[in-house]
Image (cartoon, grey):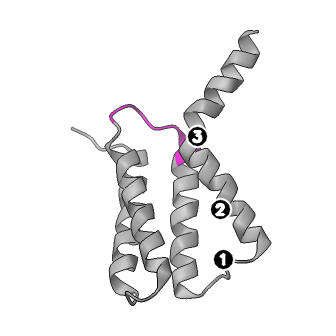
């Protein structure tokens, strides 16, 4: 049984989120957000069907933003990061619906 590149990338992002959540002090609210991101990545990882590239990439962007925010490398409260997180979250969570809307428009 071979593990695809997409599953490996999701597994790596999930592991980074869980390690970061365990390493950061527990009184930090970002710890909970990072742990939840790891759980969401785990859910996407456990889906049996092949995963498209946009949700995988946006999941990695979300994980990177969560870890960078926990480390203090970026200020997540700036408008540019908020917009990036909203767009990446929409692509990660709603990609199947977005893709269905595109295919419905092309067929009409």
Q: Which residue is mark 3?
A: 94
Which of the two labelled residues, at mark 3 and mark 2, occupies the earlier sequence position? 2
Q: Which residues are magenta?
A: 48-55
10 Å neighbourhood of mark 3: few (<14), some, or many (≥20)? few
x, y percent for residue 96? 56, 32
Question: In the drawing, does residue 77 fall left or right of residue 53?
Answer: right
Question: In the drawing, does residue 61 fall left or right of residue 12?
Answer: right
Which disc is residue 90 wearing?
A: none
CA–CA distance between discs 3 and 1? 22 Å
Please, is residue 99 above or below residue 86 in the view? above
Q: Which residue is mark 2?
A: 85
- Element under disc 3: helix
Residue under the point 48% across and 81% down: 29
Residue under the point 49% across and 78% down: 30
- Dots 2, 1 in contact, CB < 8 A: yes
Question: In the drawing, does residue 48 fall left or right of residue 66?
Answer: left
Q: Which residue is mark 1?
A: 76
Which of the two labelled residues, at mark 3 and mark 1, occupies the earlier sequence position? 1
Residue under the point 60% across and 53% down: 89
Seen from the viewer's position, the closer of residues 93 and 73 is: 93
Seen from the viewer's position, the closer of residues 6 and 59 is: 59
Please, is residue 53 above or below residue 101 in the view? below
């Amino acid at each position: 049984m071979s593990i695809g590149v997409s599953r490996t990338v999701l597994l790596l992002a999930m592991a980074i989120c869980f390690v970061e959540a365990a390493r950061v002090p527990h009184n930090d609210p970002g710890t909970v957000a990072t742990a939840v991101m790891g759980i969401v990545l785990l859910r996407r990882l456990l889906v049996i069907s092949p995963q498209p590239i946009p949700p995988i990439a946006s999941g990695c962007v979300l994980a990177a933003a969560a870890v960078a925010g926990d480390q203090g490398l970026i200020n997540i409260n700036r408008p540019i990061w908020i917009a990036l997180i909203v767009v990446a979250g929409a692509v990660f969570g709603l990609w199947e619906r977005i893709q269905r809307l595109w295919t419905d428009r092309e067929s009409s």
